Image (spheres, coloured by chain):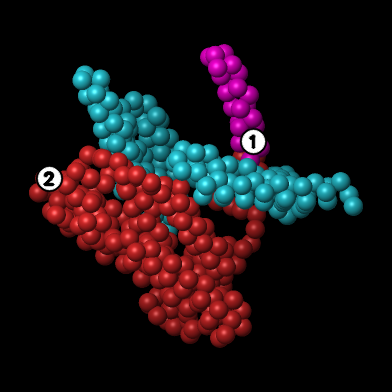
Amino acid sequence: MTRQIRLGVFTVAGCGLAAFLLWGLAGLPGFGHYHWPYGNVLNQVAPNERHTSNVVGAVVFDYRGFDTLGEEFILFSAVVGVSLLLRKDREEAAPADRVRSDPIMATGAVAAALLFVLGLWVVAFGYVTPGGGFQGGVVLAGAFLLVYLTGGYREYHALTPHSPVEMAEAIGAGAFAILGFAGIAYAGSYLGNFLGIGDAGSLYSGGSIPLLNWATAVEVCAAMILLFSEFLKTYVIPTDDWRPELGPR
Amino acid sequence: MKASDILVDVFLASGVIAQLIACIGVVAFDDVFDRLHFSGAGATLGPLLIGARACTRNRHGACGAAHRFRSGRGDGRRTVGEMIPLQVVIIVLVGAAALAVVRQADPLRQTLVNGFYGLSLVVLFVVFQAPDVALSMIVVGSIAYPLILLVAIARVRGRAEDTTDTDKQ
């Protein structure tokens, strides 16, 4: 392709994109407003009905719990897709990637531990303060990534053995679906809230929201770890002196 | 049977078939790049056809943009809220950070600047009262995404060095 043809194609595509963008922008509601009453209704109703002080949590795990089930399985199948896509037939030699600076390793260990605790907090109080299973799960997975960044693949692999993580992902996704059936049994509808709503502002609030919250956290954390493990396996397995299958020599 | 009904069926059938072929392709091929062709088609062609089916079938309900555009016009004058100065500042900052990422030529430095861009997005979410989103953006923007970029850059550079070594020999 010559430069001119490329420029022509870009001009046509760019104009099309600009037209669609302007069309979409013209349809946006004014700043701070939107057309539907749903959000305002929920802000009024959720704190009384579910005793959750974070309405986002109540929407994600209760009022629109079925949507979240779909999202969970999107993540689940995305991870399955990535492992299918990146499955390897042959091992390639890659440079060893150990971090050798003691201060960095020490800082990393402290930071990873702090991040892990922060993740647990974000998950646990997901329906009281901003946070929740999705965000907290990503934060938890971030703690493991920090171990890789400031330590090495060996430390990361020791903390995240493949089959338990895979199992955790499946258990997290399955628990969400099964809790839905518990809703049929005890509340009369799939994913219906079947526990007492508890006290607003405390960890015991929101009925079955905490259970769904933790199931999501486990699923998301394990899924993120699996994604990164697949990615790291493709790029950085140090094959010169150590293989994860054989363990340290 | 109307023409639009037939069109609906054609869109749905071709969308599902495209998706199926994409899945089979991902499983069947041995090379990662061959598989990527199919995963790309699975992420674009199938959903596009199925989306086209939804638009043809239910012009007002499913195709939200068209519906919103019309109802937005019907209101007459749109109500516009006040934007506080802090929000304007952070929007400008995000724009500047994004520009800085694009302007940086060296991939390694680009990754670093990109981390700052992610951080500015976190502040943006907080300022626009979306702390839930900000929490996940912290990890994705400042750990996960830079990590993927760094690993890829390290690998590509390692390969480049390998080829120059063999050239010398």
**Three-letter code, disc 2:** Arg
Q: Main secondary structure of the magenta part?
A: helix
Q: Chain of mark 1?
A: A
Front in this rendered view, residue A142 or B5: B5
Q: Is residue A18 visible?
A: yes
Range of residues picked out in magenta? A1-24
User: According to the rendering, which colour does chain A have?
Assistant: red
Q: Quadrant of residue B41?
A: top right
Q: Residue at x 21, y 53 (%)?
A: A154
Residue B84 badge: none
User: In which quadrant of the rendered image does the C terminus of chain A lie?
Assistant: bottom left
Residue matched to label 2 = A100
Spatial CA distance of label 2 from label 1 is 51 Å
Residue in view at x 28 percent, y 60 percent: A160
Magenta-colored stretch includes residue A15: yes
Q: Nearer the viewer, residue B5 or B76?
A: B5
> Can you give x and y, in whole percent of width and height, for residue B46 in the image?
63, 46
**Which chain corresponds to the colour cyan?**
B
| Residue beneath disc 1 | A20
Q: Is residue A159 left or right of residue A213?
A: left
**The N terminus of chain A appears in which quarter of the rendering?**
top right
Give the residue displayed 50% in from the left and 44% down from the top: B29
Quick check: A39 above or below B12? below
